[in-house]
Image (cartoon, grey):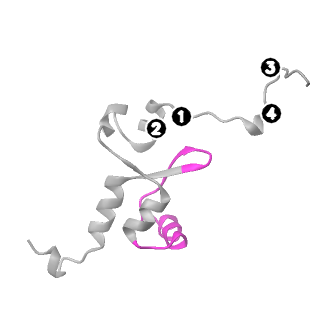
Amino acid sequence: MAAVDSSRTPPPSMTYSIPSATAIGQLTGEASPNAAHGERFLRQRDVLSRTGISRSHLYWLMDRDRFPRSIPLSPRVTVWLESDVTAWIAAQIPSTHQRAQP
């Protein structure tokens, strides 16, 4: 069995950095990492389930700034803020809808 050389570093294409909580706060416009206390992330399957739209339509809406942008957590994971998705759903209900009346 060959010994593994731990002094070698992976090629640049295989490395990535995860943004710090402060950097994420700056991207989302939050003053501090604690500003999102209690906020939940939704994965794509959750967003599609809650909204009832297809994946292609989700990205079509995002490209036209008609749906909240996703937040990249890593190269393969993107999420949406639950409050953004909930607000978008509420905005889709016309004020004349029977259930929208108080």
Q: Amino acid at mark 4?
A: Pro
Marks 2/1 in contact by CB < 8 Å: the verdict is yes
Q: Nearer the viewer, mark 2 or mark 4?
A: 4
**Residue 24 at x, y = what percent?**
46, 38
Residue 8: x %, y % from top left: 82, 22
Magenta-colored span: 52-77
Q: Secondary structure at mark 1?
A: loop
Q: Amino acid at mark 1?
A: Pro
- Name the quadrant containing residue 100: bottom left
Q: Which residue is mark 4?
A: 11
* View extreme (right): residue: 2
The location of residue 81, given as percent across then percent down, is 38, 51
In the picture of the structure, the residue carrying the numbered disc 3 is 6
**Lower position in the chain sequence, tag 2 or tag 1:** 1
Q: Amino acid at mark 2?
A: Ile
Can residue 32 be seen from the camera position used here? no
**Which residue lies most toward the front here?**
1
